[in-house]
Amino acid sequence: MKVKIGKKTGDIIKRDSKVILTVTRETYPFMPDHADGEFVYDVEGNKFIDFSSFISVYNLGLNGNKEIRNAIKKQVDKLMHPAFADFYNEMPVRFAEKLLKMAPPGFNGKVFFSNSGTEAVEAAIKFSKIFTKRPYLMAFYGGFHGRTLGSLSLTASKIVQKEMFGPFNASVHAPYAYCYRCPLHLEYPSCGIECADYIRKYPLAKEVSKKELAAIVMEPIQGEGGYVVPPKEFVKEVRKIADDAGALLVSDEVQAGYMRTGKFFAMDNFGVEADIYTMAKSIGGGVPMGATLVRGSLGDIPAGSHSTTFGGNLLAIAGAEASLDYINKNMPALQTGIIRKGAYVMKRLEEMKDKYEIIGDVRGIGLMIGVEFVRDRKTKDPAVKEKDDIADECFANGLIVLPAGQSCIRIIPTLTIDDKVLASGMDIFEQAVHNANSKLFKK
Ligand SMILES: Cc1ncc(COP(=O)(O)O)c(C=O)c1O
């Protein structure tokens, strides 16, 4: 065990439990103090490799990079809050122009700025209703879209996130193409993407009229639900279903977007264009920010129908503009790096899958990669405790990983991670998997 956790951490955790309401922390006592782009150090002085990007926020380096930090620092002394909902400012306009250039050709869109992923989704829900004058939304089982009540109506990931909060907004859910655990017990590709037909045959034939469907909201790759990559055909079918119904397609890019898969929008991997894109997490370079991008042909929303005090906050915009400028300046190298590093991780994981029965599935695109652990490859019984043990052991040896779904661990280092650091992290991860596998199968 490399990491030593002392009294300082213990004391702060005790104080935390007295004044901070419980959130989602599950296992190890990680208390980050500072980061230098490549590594993060805790309050005890332990040094960590990070495979979490701090919940997908630091895509361009742990605590951002110098350009991002300098842009934010510079703005602090000038003007932080421009009251952009009521006054005008060039910075958010300039950033919106740059951001919209990342959208598919012909999108010609407009942006609404907010402060988080859930707010970006709330805006998408409200805008879909305004544009279509229809009341219902559709989303997918396993999907996560946030925890405020509108977005929570769409979230259908873990029941603890929903119980006690209903009744919810008008919404309906459909099975997602989670092929490893096909909800229809079929196999890809012989299934003929029956799960897409299911949407036509059941929710849209028996529960919600197509005429009343405002939008289908989907994650192009499910994140919190377990890093589930659907077949291309499924996503294309969903687009068709939305079109047939005269509904919009919203791509929730909060976790999968922002270059994570090697493309700016994860939806681009499927050859599908959405009508609305939601973004957050990495977009502000570490400063809270959400963005909802709307296709130009949809028009605008009535003044006063939606707004938020801090949307267009200049610290967030400074971080966002510096981040996007960095991406655009380094695009070819960044993309090549994501593809190379993603292929390396997948190769290591495939080799591990051959050695360790506890690995049921590995999947991902670019550097958005998940490993699903099972107690039995035939029954696919989720190895929930073992997944936690693996995360704990990684932590004890200086690697930060986060779980996803029931029994997955996500491998989402910064996109700029050094090759050698990535390899060292994979070594720590493999050792933890090896130990959990040996314990489970008593080898
Ligand atoms: C796909 C997706 N949408 C929305 C959200 C909500 O974002 P936030 O936590 O910033 O509200 C998340 C958060 O994990 C997410 O992964």
Image (tube, rainbow, N blue to C red):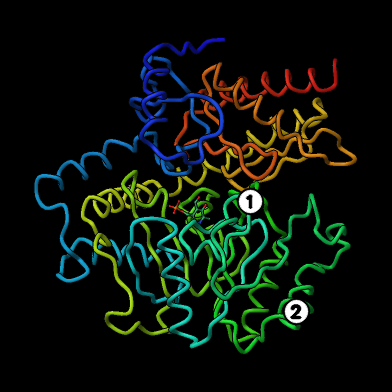
Label 2: how many Cα within 10 Å (few below 14, some 14–19, many 20+): some
Looking at the image, how many numbered discs can be counted on the residues?
2
x and y percentages locating residue 299 in the rendered image: 38, 85
User: Which residue bears the numbered disc 2?
Assistant: 200
Q: Is residue 215 left or right of residue 186?
A: left
Depth order, front residue of 198/338: 198
Label 1 is placed on what type of residue? Answer: Lys
- In the displayed structure, would residue 431 be above or below residue 328? above
Q: Is residue 167 left or right of residue 201?
A: left
Label 2 is placed on what type of residue? Answer: Arg
* Residue displayed at 51% across by 51% down: 255
Establish whether ligand 1 lies closer than 8 Å to the Cβ of label 2.
no
- In the displayed structure, would residue 294 be above or below residue 211? above
x and y percentages locating residue 77 in the rendered image: 9, 45
Spatial separation of the CA atoms under disc 2 and disc 1: 25 Å
Determine which quarter of the picture holds residue 270.
bottom right
Please give the label number shown on residue 158. 1
Q: Mark 2 or mark 1, which is nearer to you?
A: 1
